[in-house]
Amino acid sequence: QNDIYTAGVHGRKPTVPADFAELERRAKAVMSRRGWAYIAGGAGEGRTMEANRDALDRWAIVPRTLRDTSQRNLEIELFGQKLSAPVLFSPVGAGALAHPNADVHIGEAAAELGVPYIFSNQGCAPMEDVAAAMESVRPGAPRWFQLYWSTDDRLVTSLIDRAERMGAAALVVTLDTTMLGWRPQDLNLGSLPFARAEGISQYTSDPSFWEIVAERIKAATAEKPEISVGAIKTLFSIARNVPGDLRTNLTAPEPRAAVQTFLDIYSRPSLNWDDIATLRDRTSLPIVLKGILHPDDARQAVDSGIDGLIVSNHGGRQVDGSISSTDALVDVVDAVDGRAKVLVDSGFYTGSDVFKGLALGADAVCIGRPHMYGLALDGTAGARDAVANIIGELDLTLGLSGHRDVADLDRSALKHLG
Ligand code: FNR
């Protein structure tokens, strides 16, 4: 952190701006219109995104003085792994919209910082490749896997097996995206199908996926002749490993049907608590449910034997007018009462924001868009430094507020402004 602080003194130019507003501005300038719409955009009128920021602003840090904060500790332990700071990289799909080979660069960035990267189910690189890139930066670099629960259990099982093999320390199940939210920025550009097609590497690298696609094409063509192999091929045009038998019989492109076929496979709107109970038997990995906002759901999750929660509204991308993650965090922390780990994300863009999340009872905070903007600006170094800046500011905020260890933070460090 000291390095970042003194970089200016030594005349080194930072790779990314030190404040979020400028980071966002610079990233927008280098990104495509479609890429910006997908990554920066939110649901509906953007009220949930605003609420995430407003709720953080309504908590004020009340610094304490004269407490000797010359030595500080940011390290924590999470699911048996030591992390250099209580920060994770949120799972972000379709990252290629920001930078080629996004997931590999983000993985390297997280490994350099010694904090976990949660691989997205909608990633742009097979999880095995990202894990290998992280290993070459730091052996044993912490990595988790995020699952979107497919409509086909064969794919779910296969993805979990692969996650276990590639060394995932936890399995995150995202609950808030069983269907895609209402995203006007993408809808207005008509670009959602293109964005989705950027994040299919976990699927196209999975043999069970092609088995399922082949079955569905067969069933669909019998019923509805307009859904063809050609349509599927259009959607998966960026995938190099389309199996040979599916490459035959290409007809005119029908992207809409292809997108529908993909969406039908990718996520299960009927997902319910019984599925979570079966998952408990299927893996010994710690299970973390992402997208919990209601305290009753948090209680039920703990009763179902899960190990952690991520309080999240998906960065304001799913339900417009949703409760902010910070307001939800307070109730969820009280409901969980120490029986599971509680993480949070959505709108945490500075060290001061992370400080507030921890003081409100989160064990760690996940960072989404900032690392994507850093990635867009400067690949691995940009993604790393966008998050390093947040960690650097967290360290200073901790000390300047009179605390030596992130573990010591509680609500007495804050005042709610009403
Ligand atoms: C996401 N998010 C997400 N979450 C998830 O579980 N799986 C995914 O594939 C994605 N994909 C994704 C793409 C993009 C472009 C964004 C911005 C977000 C949600 C993400 O994990 C996280 O919850 C939010 O990004 C956190 O909010 P902030 O930090 O972006 O405000």
Image: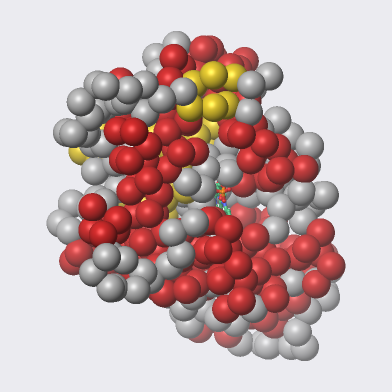
Q: 377 or 145: which is nearer to us?
A: 377
Picture residue at 29% right of the left edge, 73% below the top: 12
User: Which residue is drawn at the image coordinates 58% and 44% (left, top)?
Assistant: 347
In this view, 303 is above or below 374: above
Q: How many labels, in total? A: 0
Q: Nearer the viewer, residue 396 or 339?
A: 396
348 horizontally vs 361: left or right = right
At horizontal 26% and vertical 27% (from top left) the residue drawn is 405
Asked if residue 296 can be seen in this view, the reply is yes
Residue drawn where x is 53% and y is 56% of the image: 20
Q: Is residue 177 left or right of residue 148?
A: right
In x, y percent, where is residue 359? 43, 24
Q: Nearer the viewer, residue 69 or 38?
A: 69
Q: Give left or right: position of 273 versus 307.
A: right
Residue 298 x, y percent position in the rendering: 55, 20
Which image quadrant for residue 318? top right
| Residue 27 screen position, x and y as percent | 56, 70
Residue 123: tell me if it is visible: no
Q: Where, quadrant-wise, is the C terminus in this rendering?
A: top right
In the rendering, at what x and y percent does residue 38 appear? 67, 64
Q: Is residue 351 above or below residue 66?
A: below
